[in-house]
Amino acid sequence: MPIFEYAEAVERSPEELVRLEADLLGALRDAVGERWVTMDPLILDTYAWQYLAEMASGSNYMERPLAVVLPATTAEVAAVVKACNRLGCQYKAFSTGFGPWNGATRPYQMVQIDLRRMDRIVEIDARNMYAVVEPYVSGNQLQTEAMKVGLNTHIVGAGGQCSVLASATSVMGNSWDGISTGYSGRNLLGVEWVTPTGEIARLGSFEDDDRPFCGDGPGFSLRGAMRGHAGAFGGLGVFTRCALKLYPWHGPAKLEVSGTSPDYMVEIPEHHAAGLIVVGNWHEMAEVGYRLCEAEILDLLGRNAPALVSALLTVDNNEFADLYEIPLLHEMYYALTFIIAGQDEEDLRYKLETLKQIAKEVGGGLLLSGNGRDKLYWALRALRALARKAGWKAVLGSLPAVWRQVLAKEVRKHGLGRGLDRVSHTMYGAAIRSGDNMKAAFRYGGSFHTSMGSLASLDCAIRGAIAGEQIKKSFIERGTIFDDGCDNAWGGVYEGGCFAHLEELAMYDPRDPYCREHLSDFIIETNQACIEHRLGMPINAIGPPNHIAFSPACMDYDRWQREIKAALDPANASDPSFYTDPSFQPGPSFQAAMARVEKHRAKIVFDD
């Protein structure tokens, strides 16, 4: 069942479609050259497959595009956009591609602009700490080059394989490094923008002297209009170049990795530390989060639910099932992963002592990397915090299984010291490189969606996690989503504690018709909970159907989005499906989902 039901495609007779295809093929070849355009159905169908397509189309595929074009320059992108405007068809650009917002939403109406040929890191200015990149540059590519000159980049939680330009200009982009590097939209400096009509605009200090050190050049700013909080998801033209703020990296130019995927370890560099801070409840988690942010001692701080931690430590679902049965693993609800990238030994020592003091003040414990003399003491404190939720019987009864199924195996492979640090090494690599996030989320059923995740205070984010857990329980009981113990809130704290987010992941089987049809109910119900309990604007407050619910509660923001869209894109050529579309009307499938949600609403209780 598609949650998004789009306006019908423009009706064209077979003869009109043949003429359009011929005219379009000629125009696109003129724009980029014959080699870089195709209308081959076999190739077009490869672009129709997208993760989460079933949420948008009701099947595992998006619509087949009219054509695929691969431009190599901004001028070529502008020529493609102008051709689409002139011939009366829409276009949708994507870079590395991740989700239905990349695909065609109407049959025989849309040109897919694949930006993979635009893959250059144009510049890294080490002195002024920024980089200029094209759309196909991934987070790990930029990070690899930045680390060589003592810098690092923010990488979105969707993973190091994602385009850093897309996250900064067009979509959302939070991650665990947000405590020290902010989030994607906040790191955006200058941009090169092909507007919906094909004009080339340069914003920020790009506009003045080609040195993109500033996000706002002379005159008024358009950054709020072009991306706002969540981005336009391809609904306002194409971004072909951007500048991003970089941050100091107090680590080696290259990280050392051993093992083979998916079972590998990243060496924790000298003067760095990684581990878990464990507390006894949500209130203590909020308190420790605020204190750690105020102390400014951490480079990464984030939460992984127990099911995701177990997935990171195992290579397949069989191993996961055995590991997750251990009470100590599935009861580790109130734990935050942290990383300290110290400048030298003195800096690391100060930060660790501050961390320990904060942990002690909130009654928590630590699972620490390295060979500190008090490592066992802090581990026992962590077990005591876990026992406040699970009980000492469950905690102590779990220790033999933890040794047998995790630690002993790693000690045999890596030696005593590194083997006992397996969790810390794994979490370090997963957080710094953002390489394992998707492996864990896709592990269980083959796909996942996410919900909640408002960018708000940490207290508000935790309330969202509590609500999401109660909603998720009913969907697990009905067989819609995977049983992850109900808790799967992933997220972090950003910019010194000013913001936080916890999104509620839901894993499901995209091959199962029941799951495909009813997953949208989960999204609708979590969205409604955000409105009713004042939990902020969640991740899924995007696209025309969701604006119907959220815009009246948020100063009628979609009216302004529609006015921006009409002014910049009078022909509605840049696909509006995940941005704003005045022509959208809820269809029968969406209305049926709303009726099902009202029938099965979970009762949400907050223990205030």
Image: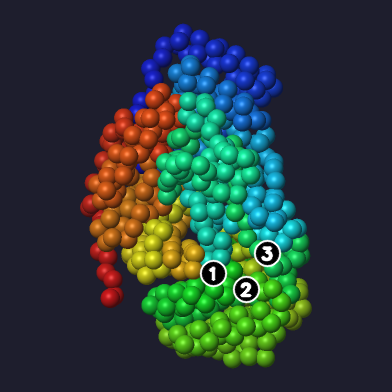
Q: Which residue is mark 2?
A: 340
Amino acid type assigned to the residue bearing label 1 in the image: Leu
Mark 2, residues whose alpha carbon is within 10 Å: few (<14), some, or many (≥20)?
many
Name the residue nearer the viewer: 582 or 407: 582
- The correct choice, above or below, for 449 with respect to 266 in the image is above
Q: For the N terminus, which image quadrant? A: top left
Mark earlier in primary sequence (1, 3): 3
Kindly report the distance in space between the C-alpha atoms of the residues bearing marks 1 and 2.
9 Å
Horizontally, residue 521 falls left or right of residue 511, namely: left
Name the residue nearer the viewer: 48 or 147: 147
Q: Residue at x 61, y 71 (%)?
A: 339
- The correct choice, above or below, for 482 with respect to 346 in the image is above
Name the residue nearer the viewer: 20 or 553: 553
Q: Which residue is mark 1?
A: 301
- Displayed quadrant of residue 149: bottom right
Q: Position of residue 380 (x, y in %)?
A: 55, 89
Q: Is residue 353 visible?
A: yes
Give the mark toward the camera: 2 or 3: 3
Query: Helix or strand or loop: what does disc 1 sit on?
Result: strand
